[in-house]
Image: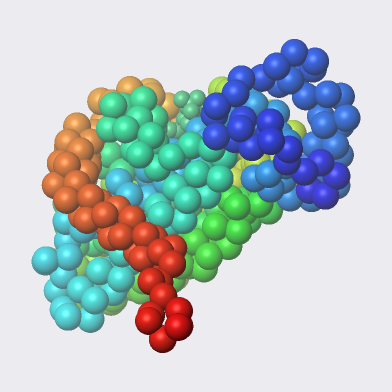
Amino acid sequence: MAAVTADQTTQAKAQGTVQATAGGPDGADGAQLAAFDAAVAADERIEPRDWMPDAYRASLVRQMAQHAHSEIIGMQPEANWISRAPSLRRKAILMAKVQDEAGHGLYLYSAAETLGTSREELLDKLHAGRQRYSSIFNYPTLTWADVGAIGWLVDGAAITNQVPLCRCSYGPYARAMVRICKEESFHQRQGYELLLALGRGTPAQRDMAQDAVNRWWWPSLMMFGPPDDASAHSEQSMIWKIKRHSNDELRQRFVDICVPQAEALGLTLPDPDLWWNEERGHHDFGSIDWTEFQEVLKGNGPCNEQRLTQRRRAHEEGAWVRDAAAAYAVKHHAEKHTTPTPTAEATA
Ligand code: BYC
């Protein structure tokens, strides 16, 4: 955004050291708010040093933190299969994918830091159960075919949701999403290719692939969030152009993409009410069990407890790595900024 750049007050607000003052919404004068609204309306990017309403900042932190947490918790269900991958090739691919998820978490935590929050603070909130991560990662990975189903469906849903986020109004989030989406595309293809291989395999392998798809289909549809009429944040997020499409719109897009892909894979999507509606130009599909979704959000999914316990343990066990990295950074910084002692020759 070109019109309003940061002054000291804005920077202090980004660091969370001052509260909104009187004089307008969030202490802004009318001109700041008007410039923000105009930038959003003109599809310009809001950058970290630009003035922004407190509620916009808070909503971004909420969504970006949830997104970052999903990436790092999302490593667990698949990492479960690294040691049991059926070939060296599959193991190498899966390791690369899981490593990518950690990288996505880092991009997103870094992007969230530009809003004046620290990674430590966000992780503390995750570990205390005060911030969410995606419902999808509270389901177990029971067989090798689950790795394929996660790649095809979960990463496929993630791409459908995340491609529009590349045009999100907040610059650092939008830019992080461009790279993430490229990597997600590889993730989705590896899942599709894995299921294709199983589908062309023995009857037992085909059954395993179908069983995995049966279990992951409905939770994947829930990833898009509650229906539009129950979505608390969608309306405002769409006005701010954080979100570009509603939850139901993206869910429909995903269903329409998956149907022909399932046919090509020779797999059936577990929904007897799934059929092409000529009039709408979309597939109709059955009702989603929103009670199950709400239960998972409340912490009562099959793996909620296991995922959080494992995350807290990994964090505690990794404390020495963080301490070592911080000590190295201090040492490196000190060395870089120490003026070299003049030699005898130089002072002569
Ligand atoms: N799970 O008003 P709504 C990945 C919450 S990682 C849990 O519609 P919003 C991958 C929502 O937070 C994929 N909670 O919310 C990684 C809100 O609660 P609060 C992660 C959910 O924000 C590793 C309440 O329900 N992707 O792909 O407008 C391996 C009301 O919802 C869920 C992202 O995070 C859910 N599914 O829309 C493989 C994408 N859905 O905050 C793959 C970025 C909703 O009021 N996020 N809630 O307590 C978004 O696009 C949006 O945040 C959502 C929700 C569409 C998810």
Question: Residue 268 lies in what quarter of the image?
Answer: bottom left
Question: Residue 69 lies in what quarter of the image?
Answer: top left
| Residue 217, position as x, y percentages in the image | 38, 48
In this view, 332 is above or below 44: below
Q: Nearer the viewer, residue 107 or 115?
A: 115
Give the residue at x 62% y 30%. Answer: 13
| Residue 316, position as x, y percentages in the image | 17, 42
In this view, 235 is above or below 214: above
Q: Quadrant of the C terminus?
A: bottom left
| Residue 343, position as x, y percentages in the image | 38, 80
Is any atom of residue 64 visible in this view? yes
Give the residue at x 83% y 24%. Answer: 29
User: Is 59 situated left or right of 118 in this image?
Assistant: right
Residue placed farthest to the top in the image?
22
Give the residue at x 64% y 41%. Answer: 243
Residue placed farthest to the front in the image?
348
In this view, 267 is above or below 243: below
Q: Nearer the viewer, residue 90 or 126?
A: 126
